[in-house]
Image: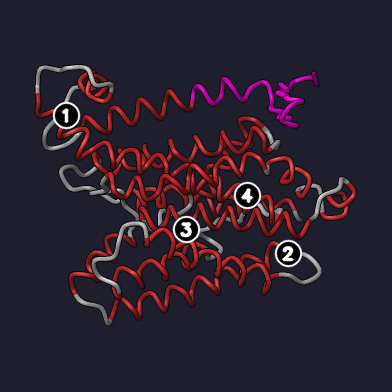
Amino acid sequence: MKKNSLIFRSTKLGFSFRIQNQVPSTLFILIIITLAAMVINTSLGEYPTPPLAVIQTVLGIDTGNPDYAFVINTLRLPRILTACLVGMALAISGTIMQSLTRNSLADPGIIGINSGASLAAVSVIVLLPNFPAGILPLSAFVGALVASLLIYFLAWDRGLHPVRLILIGVGISAVASAFTSLIVTFGQISDVSQALVWLAGSVYGRTWEQVFAFLPWIVIFVPLALIKAPELNALNLGDDIAKGLGNKVEWQRSLLLLISAALSGAAVATAGTIGFVGLIAPHIARQLVGGNHQGLIPVAGMTGAMIVVLSDFIGRIIFAPIEIPCGIVTAVIGAPYFIYLLINNRKSKT
């Protein structure tokens, strides 16, 4: 066993997983905070429910009030679970993107990937009324993947340069946003209203149908991201070292880009453009557990879940009974943080 790390190994499965000692305790604390925020958030609303009743209802324990089951399980729980899963997906997507580009400023929302997903999703909302719930995540994934590939190939010049990547990402984002506005301009009022609420980034009104449409993307791509964590560690050392360790660099990078786009696109399709989660969560996670992706990815995922759940909670109480979309709350927090990172990044190069 290496110092300051825990190793889980299975010779039969050919599986080895190494995490820092502080990862389990950090994950436990993040899970407790997130669960507490979910319970309190679920108890809020026009029909207040005690937090204990929320826990009993979710666990199937009789509370003596039949209304609780409908209010909690049907109206509120899908919203809270969506916030949790969307935050996790965005955070893991951002972690992968920052590692692939070796750029701490990379984020699916900042460099245009989310804008590509938004363009595809808004096209479906406005141009294809009464679409099945499962179509939206798929269309957003295609939009995110196309944007990712465009940014990647346009930014490549004997390597990925951070400034070039950001500039091209901002350009792709501007073009995608312009086309999104064009589609919204010529759409039907009812469809446009739905699209505009969705673009603000909100989990309001989410149903079990949308949760179940989003869940397969989490079940498939989050474990896949964890499995590819060792390759991320190798790629983070540079292409030459990664090749020396036996990695097929371009294949691994393409697969990881696909995972990042899938998680980001599905999250955007489910809750709209909730920005800066993929930027903030990986930075917080690195401060907590370091840069080993086998521990960083799960911690970043739980950090992202916590951020979106707390943002939804803040948006619901700060101007109650008016609700502020959680995407606006994350933007208010994330934009100054992004400027702070830009200043720090500039100082580190001078």
For the residues bearing labels 2 and 1, Cβ distance under 8 angstroms: no
Label 4 – label 1 distance at C-alpha? 39 Å
In the figure, residue 23 lies in which quadrant?
top right
Q: Which residue is mark 2?
A: 161
- How packed mark 3 is, by other alpha carbons closer than 10 Å (few <14, some 14-19, many 20 or more), is many
Q: Quick one: label 4 or label 2, which is nearer the N terminus? A: 4
Q: Secondary structure at mark 3?
A: helix
In the displayed structure, 136 sits above or below 192; it is: above
Front disc: 4 or 3: 3
Residue 210 in percent (x, y) is at: 32, 50
- Say the numbered circle drawn on residue 243: none
Q: Which residue is mark 3?
A: 265
Under mark 4, the amino acid is: Ile
Label 1 – label 3 distance at C-alpha? 32 Å
Q: Secondary structure at mark 4?
A: helix
Residue bounds of the magenta highlight: 1-29
**Residue 308 belongs to magenta span:** no
Label 4 – label 3 distance at C-alpha? 14 Å
Which residue sits at x=61%, y=56%?
106
Which residue sits at x=27%, y=48%?
206
Q: Quick one: label 4 or label 1, which is nearer the N terminus? A: 1
Q: Which residue is mark 1?
A: 69
Q: Which residue is mark 4?
A: 96
Q: Secondary structure at mark 1?
A: helix
